[in-house]
Amino acid sequence: MQNRQTIRRRKRKKINKRRITALILIPVLMIILAGGTYAYYLYNKANNVLSDSYDGTTNNRGVKPGKDNVSVLFMGVDDSEVRNNSTGSRTDALMLATFNDKEKTVKLLSIPRDSYVYIPGKDKYSKITHAHAYGGVNYTIDTVENLLDVPVDYYVKMNFNAFVDVIDALDGIEVDVPYTFSEQNSKDKKNAIKLEKGLQTLDGEEALALARTRKLDNDIERGKRQQEILKAIAAKATEVSSITKYADVIEGVGKNMTTNMTFNEMKGFTSYILGGKGLTIESLNLKGGDSYINGTYYYQLDQASLESVKDELKVHLGLKSDSEIQPSNTTPDSTTPDNVTPETGESEVLDNTTTVE
């Protein structure tokens, strides 16, 4: 019988193919909005391009960026033509950002794609990545709100093309590559990207390869690399020399993005960049461990860590005060709740057309 480590390695090969990192894309939206304040041309270009990304819906709380504390759910979805899986596509990256208007601070929570969570729309527990495959944006938002007990005011859904296009528009980013490796490119061509160890300038495809590879380390180290790439994008995009590149950045994001934010609402985020302190992002993570249910791998969230993060997000959004936070005595829970049906195998057929893993 195969041991769990062998099974885990095989599963990693499956899910390693298109990990789009919304973490890396998060500064892009705010940067292109700030660009609109510098020139009439950029303003109108941003208005035209980004307005086409608007889905026509509004947030339920009636809050406005630049006036209120708000949250934004960033979804990285693989809907590439290569894979032809736009129907029932999964979220390969899921990030919730909270914005505190008074402090002009941003907290960014990364939610592991294999997290074992309750999906309200299906009344079942499964991997959080499956929520989008089951019911698109609405199912994903409902699932995140249920998990974290905070409202999701806005969402931004992007595909990996935005990541590549933005970095290329900025003429690359400077990153310290931790080791020499080869990786497939965005077209799934094996070993198409070859990088040497050391500080260097990477183009979009090379940065994407660095962001998703884990051949020589693990998910934790990959997360650290993604954060470094995020910082590199933010640093490059906020350089004075990058202002002339904003038009291409706008194009790269706009054609690969869907959101429920209007252009006027997007402009509210410029204060987080132009406030004099620069763009600062505090990264949050959910602790947990490997778990197998009916032979299927899941990431089992540590309940104490989850409760702590929920409280931190609530305080940052002004939904709870520091004095209301109580020390948690909760211990990790790896059991399946009563009256909930877990996945029964490695894959499941959705609507007789789509298979999720």
Image (cartoon, rainbow, N blue to C red):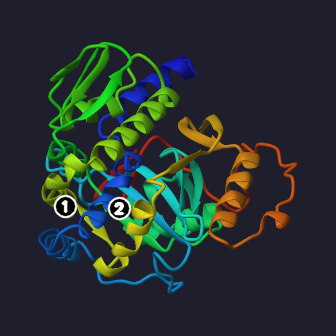
* Residue 15 visible in the shown view: yes
Residue on which disc 2 sits = 30
Residue occupying the point 30% across, 64% down: 34
Q: Is residue 326 above or below residue 228?
A: below
Q: Quadrant of residue 333?
A: top right
211 left or right, relative to 168: right
Q: Is residue 180 above or below residue 344?
A: above
**Residue named by callout 1:** 250
Q: Is residue 350 above or below residue 39?
A: above
Location of residue 245 with respect to 57 vertically, above or below: above
Q: Quadrant of residue 49?
A: bottom left
User: Which quarter of the figure is the N terminus placed in?
Assistant: top right
Looking at this rendering, what residue extends furthest in the bottom direction? 62
Secondary element under disc 2, as helix, strand or loop, is: helix
**Observer able to see residue 352:** no
* Rendered residue at 31%/58% (across/down): 31
Residue 86's quadrant in the figure?
Answer: bottom left
Nearest the camera: 311 or 139?
A: 311
Is 151 on the left-hand or right-hand side of 352?
Answer: right
x 45%, y 19%: residue: 217
Q: What is the x, y in percent for residue 352?
A: 32, 60
How much space separates mark 1 and mark 2, taking CA atoms?
A: 11 Å
Q: Which mark is residue 349?
A: none
